[in-house]
Image (tube, rainbow, N blue to C red):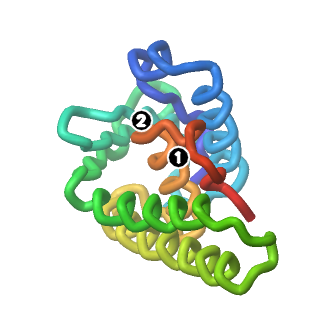
Amino acid sequence: MPLAEIRIDEALWSAATPERRIEWRQALHDLLEEHVLAERSAPLHLNVRVAPHGHTLLEARTSDGVDVARVDLPGAALAPHFKEYFDICRDMGKLRESAHSPRLEALDIAKRIAHDEAAETLVDLCRPLGPDHATCRRLFTLLVTLHFDTTRLLLPHHRR
């Protein structure tokens, strides 16, 4: 099922800095361009809202407004993934080594593993939408940028 559109809650969008909106646009673009969701007949419009206590709400509707799925991503389920991911990013930012140092490469691998583990959690939590693992990796990237101001990191979280 294709996603026709992904919208971030207007209150969150309006309160964001231009730099954060740029990151969000990139994460949204990546998710829209490459995603796999359960087959349905109509393209979906996905609304994303960060709710109190770190919850994230995903609401999928058809273009004529029919509700298809509502997924509540509990903050408690994502918090350990966020922590591990940012701990690794902080360690990467503290290194004063070349881009090809063994320590930096090891941390980069650890970051990818943390991203994969977060995606596995999201696959389980997002069952009503039926995303694959790669889609949940992209969704985790979006969630990271929504919950944290990643524009302030010493080392960009999206280093490849």
Give the amino acid type for the residue marked by disc 2 in the picture.
Val
The one nearer the camera, 122 or 111, is 111
| Image quadrant where one finds the N terminus | bottom right
Q: Residue at x 71, y 86 (%)?
A: 102
Q: Is residue 79 above or below residue 154?
A: below
At label 1, counting other C-alpha atoms closer than 10 Å, the crowd grade (few under 14, some 14-19, many 20 or more) is many
Q: Secondary structure at mark 1?
A: helix
Who comes first in sequence, dot 2 or dot 1? Answer: 2
Image spot of residue 129 (x, y percent): 41, 56
Residue with the mark numbered 2: 48
Label pair 2/1, CB-CB below 8 angstroms = yes
Q: Is residue 158 above or below residue 51?
A: below
Q: Which residue is mark 1?
A: 142
Please state if 158 lies on the left or on the right of 89 as rendered.
Answer: right
Under circle 2, the secondary element is strand
Foreground residue among 44 and 42: 44
Q: Which residue shows up at 61% across the image and 48% down it? A: 154
Categorize mark 2 by other alpha carbons within 10 Å: few (<14), some (14-19), many (20+): many
Residue 36 visible in the current orientation: no
The quarter in which the C terminus is drawn is bottom right
Q: Callout 1, which amino acid?
A: Leu
Residue ID at (76%, 80%): 101
